Amino acid sequence: MKLLFLGPSNSYYNQFESHCLKNSYDISCVKDLKKLKEKYSEIALFIIDDDFEEKSSVDFIKTIRSFEDDKKVEHKPIICISDDDTIESRQKAFERGVDDFVDKYEMNSIFLKINSFIRPNTLWQGINAMVVEDEFISAKFISHVIRTKGANVINYNNAVEAFEYLKGPNGHDVDLILTDHMMPNLSGISFVKKIRNELGNNLVPIVFISSVENKSEVLEFYKAGGNDYLSKPLIKEELFVKVDQLLSNRYKSRVLKDQVEQLENVNRVKDKFLAVCTHDLRTPLNTIIGLTNMIIEEESVSQDVGEYLGQIDSSAKNLLTLVNELLDLSEIQSKSNKVELVEVDILSVIKSSLRNFTAINNKKVNMHFYTSVKKAPIYGNQSMLLRVFNNILSNAYKFTPDNGKIYTSVKSEDSFYRIKIEDTGIGMPSDFVSKIFDEFSTIGRTGLKGEKSTGLGMSIVKKIIDDHNGKITVDSIEGKGTIFTIDFKKVKK
Amino acid sequence: MKVLFIDDTVDNLSLFKIYMKNFDEADCTFESDPRKGIEHILTDTFDIIFLDIEMPEIDGFQVLDSVDSIKAPIFALTAHLSGEIINRIKEHTKIQGVVHKPVLKKNLIEIIKNEAS
């Protein structure tokens, strides 16, 4: 069958052409309709590239339709494809007379539509339908109707045997079930319940066919897990429309499932890559930092050279910090589902972190600690929590001037512990505060003694606290200081 | 002092070689293959061993599992500052101490001098 593509002959068209070959369609590409009259009879369907048509001055759709009206021939299907799938463009296209509108890059959808117009009897090709109906004539009619669209049909006159088939090795291949209700041994509604609950199959669409217009029965059917309902006497078109809907939903969810799998794969690759990458990045830094330090310590160099070496050393250390933080962030991200939460005394974690600080407190910042509790058990991961407090305290320290103050307090509230870390540092402007926990927010700032920041530390802190089901908030006034408030739920005893 | 360095990264070993170049008190062996490292530990007698932890094929912990009792003190080399690995190192009975990477010459020399006395 021949298709006509109205648009440019570019790489997209080449892709389109190969899909046509796969679907046994002949296709030719033209940019204008000069030879429309000659070729018209051969063409089964038109594909119009909406983006191309907009740029050209001719309205293809109008030309085709007025040609057809002049000749008094039936309209051939026109499918409009576009990169701009919005309600507005769809409306415009339909107003001008297209039969369908599809996203340019959804090849499978495009061909499904093409098939539905010009090969309707293969619309459901490859679909396996199951019809469960004890009334012979109805069963024959329904099966026949479904077969005219190309699907395979398996027939059962009772639900017990049908269920056995679904339990068996081929059960998964059934794409659609149509079932009656009034049957001996196992009713339609019970059949549906068995499929959803016993078999655990929530994906296969089930259509209910019944001659009784009993609203409560229909409701029972939906409650049991059925998808749609057809009343007898069956109307062919109603069956087509409802089944089509259900099948296209099933198809779309399969596509989504594939995409999720692909994304999960990409994530795994990214994690592996980061792990390898950071290990390899660290190694040369070992040499740079190690030897620079050795030269500074042991060799007598001029003041200038000493300055240069100092710069090399601090740059290398900054790079190392960034590499470490990147690796930490990716490790935390990939572990977030596997974080083991055990009982941890958050008080001892905080004390531990504070102790680390007193050792390197060159600026003589006053560290104060208040608490009225002896123990503060929460569910968490000790090393991750230590990192949280190390990060927050190191920030507080970085941005607090000599002889400033850092107050840390742990308070017991009803169901949670509230931890506050308050400094008398330079504070942050309000637009910083709102972005502080964003990953890669690039709002890292230089510390008061020139310490460089990567801007990642806070996003690591937020991630860990989120994984602990805790809460963190920041308040800050420029020139006055910053307060971090963290809440953790108490262990329920 | 007989010193053994085991680190799979050749560049790290080069760095240690430079560090140890003019330090005559130490007679050093540098090994990049952890398997050969295990052989060294079993057959030779060292006064101090520096062992890298993060190695792809056989890591530091596996090296330690492969030798029963080691007389020489073992110092772990690692880039990690906290977390699971550090906890394992701290709790390991065969490990005497940790040297954090990037390794500074002065730290290395200090440890060797301490062990010598």
Image (tube, coloured by chain):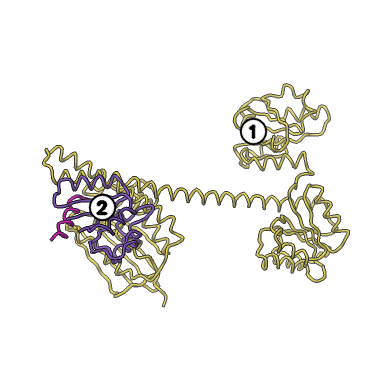
Chain colours: A yellow, B purple
Residue A77 found in image quarter? top right
Q: Which chain is indicated by disc 2?
A: B
Element type where label 2 sits in the image: strand
* Residue A244: percent from left, percent from top: 73, 50
Cβ–Cβ under 8 Å for marks 2 and 1? no
Magenta stretch bounds:
B103-117
Mark closer to the observer (2, 1) = 2
At label 2, the amino acid type is: Phe
- The residue that label 2 is drawn on is B5
Neighbours of disc 1 within 10 Å: few (<14), some (14-19), many (20+) = many
Element type where label 1 sits in the image: helix
At label 1, the amino acid type is: Asp
On the rendered structure, is A300 left or right of A2?
left
- The residue that label 1 is drawn on is A50
On the rendered structure, is B58 left or right of B72?
right
Residue A209 found in image quarter? bottom right
Along the line of sight, which residue is nearer the eye, B81 or A234?
B81
* Residue A45: percent from left, percent from top: 74, 34
* Residue A156: percent from left, percent from top: 81, 61
- Residue B115 among those drawn in magenta: yes
Q: What separation in Å lies between label 2 and label 1 (alpha carbons)? A: 69 Å
Residue farthest toward the top in the current orientation of the protein: A34
Q: Which chain is indicated by disc 1?
A: A
Residue A417 appears anywhere in the view: yes
Give the dominant element type of the magenta stretch: helix, strand or loop.
helix
Image quarter where the N terminus of chain A lies is: top right
Neighbours of disc 2 within 10 Å: few (<14), some (14-19), many (20+) = many
Q: Which mark is residue A290?
A: none
On the rendered structure, is A278 left or right of A448?
right
